[in-house]
Amino acid sequence: MSRDTIKNLLEQIKKGSMQPEEVLDILISEPYTDLGFARIDDHRALRDNFCEVVFCQGKEPSQVAQIMEHLALKNDRLLGTRASEEVFQAVQQIIPDICYHRQARLLYRPAPGWQTEQRVAVVTAGTADLPVAEEAALCLETMGIPVVRLFDVGVAGIHRVMDNLPLIREVQVVIVVAGMDGALASVVGGLTHRPVIAVPTSVGYGASFGGLAALLSMLNTCAPGVGVVNIDNGYGAAALARAIIETNHG
């Protein structure tokens, strides 16, 4: 259930076409739906401004398909992260207009509606960080937030960052996606007053410890205004950027 749905129900009471008791019954039955293997949070959009996002990894394709089918009944925009090709095929049979980005492993269904004029830059240190970066970018676009993509501008060629500073400084939030030493987040954080969301990736040689080195580097940054999400968590960065945009927009 979305905020618009709630507003519509209240309007129906105001017009006299529905009784308060009828609306109350709807609201009582709506908080979640029990599918047996999953309890879907139908009120997520009321709290977070976006419906429940499905983490597909570890679930059977048929389970993801059933969850997404239920969400599609009440929400135009949909997201499913860490989705395999098999999961995509199962969901597509039920929701034909679902989209799939293989590199980002993302199921998404954008839709017309609310879109802010504020933008988010998604910046990567290298091309190998693109799967996580595209997850963040596509999640944002599905949520109604325009994205500026700046890829492969790592500190090994720091002039690439400097060349794109005007773009970085024009957006409202910057998401920096980096593996290896994770240094790009500190560099960008020191060059802009915008909020920077750092996303460490599992890209790197052995001593990167699957992204732990980048995570610790980002957490230890001395640049002000840098927040850090979990390793490879592009969706988490998008959700945080959306919250910042919503706060400023409101």
Image: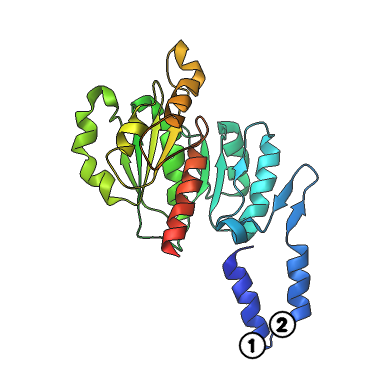
Q: The N terminus appears in which quarter of the rendering?
A: bottom right
1 and 2 marks in contact (CB < 8 Å): yes
Q: The C terminus appears in which quarter of the rendering?
A: bottom left
Horizontal placement of 119 versus 163: left or right? Answer: right
The quarter holding residue 126 reads top left
- Identify which residue is drawn at 62% across, 81% down: 11
Q: Compared to 130, does 72 lie above or below?
A: below
**Res. 100 visible in picture:** no
Horizontal placement of 47 versus 186: left or right? Answer: right
Residue at mark 2: 18
Give the SS element for disc 2.
Answer: loop
Horizontal placement of 71 versus 181: left or right? Answer: right
The residue most toward the top is 206
The label on residue 15 is 1
The residue most toward the bottom is 16
- Identify which residue is drawn at 65% across, 51% down: 69
- Give the image location of residue 143, x and y in percent: 48, 53
Residue type of the residue flagged with mark 2: Met
- Residue sitting nearer the eye, 210 or 128: 210
Q: 10 Å neighbourhood of mark 2: few (<14), some, or many (≥20)? A: some
- Give the image location of residue 44, x and y in percent: 63, 55
- Give the image location of residue 10, x and y in percent: 64, 78
Q: Compared to 49, does 127 lie above or below?
A: above
- Give the image location of residue 122, x and y in percent: 36, 41
Horizontal placement of 247 versus 55: left or right? Answer: left
- Residue sitting nearer the eye, 223 or 242: 223
The label on residue 107 is none
Q: Compared to 67, does 128 lie above or below?
A: above
Residue type of the residue flagged with mark 1: Lys
- Identify which residue is drawn at 45% across, 61% down: 112
Q: 10 Å neighbourhood of mark 1: few (<14), some, or many (≥20)? A: few
The residue most toward the right is 36
